[in-house]
Image: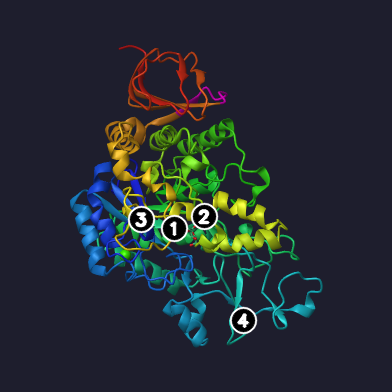
Amino acid sequence: MGYDFKNKVIYQIWPRSFKDSNGDGIGDLGGVIEKLPYIKSLGVDAIWLSPVYPSHNHDYGYDIDDYCSINPEFGTMEDFDRLVSEAKAMGIGIVMDLVVNHTSSHHKWFREAVENPGSKYRDYYIFKKGRKADDHPGYKLPVTTGTIPPNNWLSAFGGSAWQKDKKTGEYYLTLFTPNQCDLNWANPEVREEVWNIMRFWLDRGIAGFRLDVINAIAKREGLPDSGNPKKLNFPFEHIVSLPKTHEYLKEMHEKVLSHYDCFTVGEGMVTPLDAVLKYTGPGTNELDMMFQFDLALIGCGPLGKFDFRKLYHWTVREYKDIFDHWETGVEKGGGWLGNYISNHDQPRPVSRFGDDKKYRRESAKALAMINITMLGTPFIYQGEEIGMTNCPLEPEEWKDFEAINDYEMLQSMMHLPAPIAKKVIQKMTRDHARTPMQWSGGDNAGFTDGHDTWIKVNPNYRQINVEDDLKHGDSIIDFYKQLIRLRHLNDELNYGSYRMIAKDNPQVIVYLREYNDRRLLVAVNMTGKPAYVDIGETEYKKGHIILGTHGNKKYSRYLSLEPYEGRIYRVSHSD
Ligand code: GLC
Ligand code: CA
């Protein structure tokens, strides 16, 4: 594979909320095309488009009705082809989101599977007979007319992972929303279908795929209960990174990816370091890179983002330890990461890791500096480059199934009083990432010419928007441009080694990136208080700043940093 994915910077677009071109209040492909010059001006190499296929929007595009067409809400296949060719002319690749752990329940395969249980499509999915409730005294699962689901698996969004098929009384597996039906990857015909879908898009000239929950495509044979059979449990041990998953990905590589100049980034739940190395390490011929979730889940309890038991408290030391564990481990094992500080599933980074009030600009830049200089390929999510913040949303304004469902679950299963459950959701809901991109201080933040928007616009758009940021002497967008340019000009950041120093410093993260005798030192104060760091007796006695959030400051062994100040120095032992 010739594609060099290590020196690329990728911009993620969640099309529904990026830019509306026809006034219906829903972002679309026309809007992405309109904004290509803006995206180009940032200097990025590729756009990852969250799903643009037809969808009933149970999970806003991640429930796909048809893999080889375009959602009419977003435009037509002609619009898509125009996007690919106009982007290509600007040197920008388009990365498609491939969601093939499941299809939507409206997909024609699934319709056939339920309407004609005798058809071959039945075996495209995971159907299984229920169990007799009477045989399981004390079983706590919801009992529906005599049978209970085939096992105790919990869905990722709460509730049983099984839905009853009315016609036959059997159950089918839905690990996410009840309308996302898990595909049966053990069936070779299913895999052939997926390879064909991939070829369809690659032949249209795309640059690669982001593979949704790809580490869960294989399921343990026999579908055994997970943990205590009397409770609903999420079946991590029976679905995550099974040996078969690796086999399927090798087959994908051999049959499809190896024939194209493209790259892949894998997303998955719970992907520890050793698993990431198995997917992306040298000679594995599976994926080019994976995302890790440990930084995104810092401060959350072991059950994930709505597990509030740690009260979302985290320290810079913990952040640095996780960071170091991943960077060192990936480097040693020869794997590769896609790095990010947010995406369409996460709250806004300045609200989560920075300070979205007093130091909004500073912390947006500090986080960007870390993201773009880490070992791995940086992904930037729309709106990060203007420091967009979380949005105050009331339960009736929530759009995301996860938020709405987990709000109920927190009350019924975890026995949280409603006001507390509401706070937990408001802290972490994916809707924060999905409010419209703020282009200007005009009506609806310049996102649409229409009157309404499909989701609320963050009320702070008059202060926080692209137009205003670009006029600001202290522009965050401009800082992103400088970081991206720096990344492209300095191979230390693309191919270099990584080493953290001053590990014990409780406020500042400091690391070296080195390649062919050239060295960069990055130091970022991750707190809202002034900080001081002794970078120690390194062999690097001399240095000069090449980029700073607070202007050009001298290099020395002892650095004093202002709140959220970040600096990148070129260092050497002699000049
Ligand atoms: C991934 C996507 C998320 C989606 C889920 C199910 O985690 O990023 O948005 O809800 O998969 O497809
Ligand atoms: Ca539209």
In this orientation, which residue lies closer to the viewer: 110 or 32? Answer: 32
Residue type indicated by callout 2: Leu
User: Residue 442: horizontal and vertical position, in percent?
Assistant: 31, 51
Which colouring convention does the figure follow?
rainbow
* Residue under the point 41% across and 47% down: 283
Q: Are marks 2 and 3 in contact (CB under 8 Å)?
A: no
For label 2, count other residues whose C-alpha is less than 10 Å away and answer few (under 14), some (14-19) or many (20+): some
Which region is colored magenta?
Answer: 499-506
Mark 4 to mark 3: distance in Å?
Answer: 47 Å
* Residue under the point 24% across and 65% down: 79
Identify residue for label 2: 393
For label 3, count other residues whose C-alpha is less than 10 Å away and answer few (under 14), some (14-19) or many (20+): many
Residue 456, disc: 1
- Residue most extreme to the left: 89
User: Circle 2 sits in a helix, a strand or a loop, which is it?
Assistant: loop
Task: Give the label, 4 or 3, closer to the camera.
Answer: 3
Which of marks 1 and 3 precedes in the sequence? 3
Q: Are marks 1 and 2 in contact (CB under 8 Å)?
A: yes
In the image, residue 261 sits, relative to residue 362, either above or below, namely below
User: Residue 194: horizontal and vertical position, in percent?
Assistant: 40, 68
Task: Give the label, 4 or 1, closer to the camera.
Answer: 1
**Is residue 398 something one can see in this rendering?**
no
User: Residue 467: horizontal and vertical position, in percent?
Assistant: 29, 44
Mark 4 to mark 1: distance in Å?
Answer: 40 Å
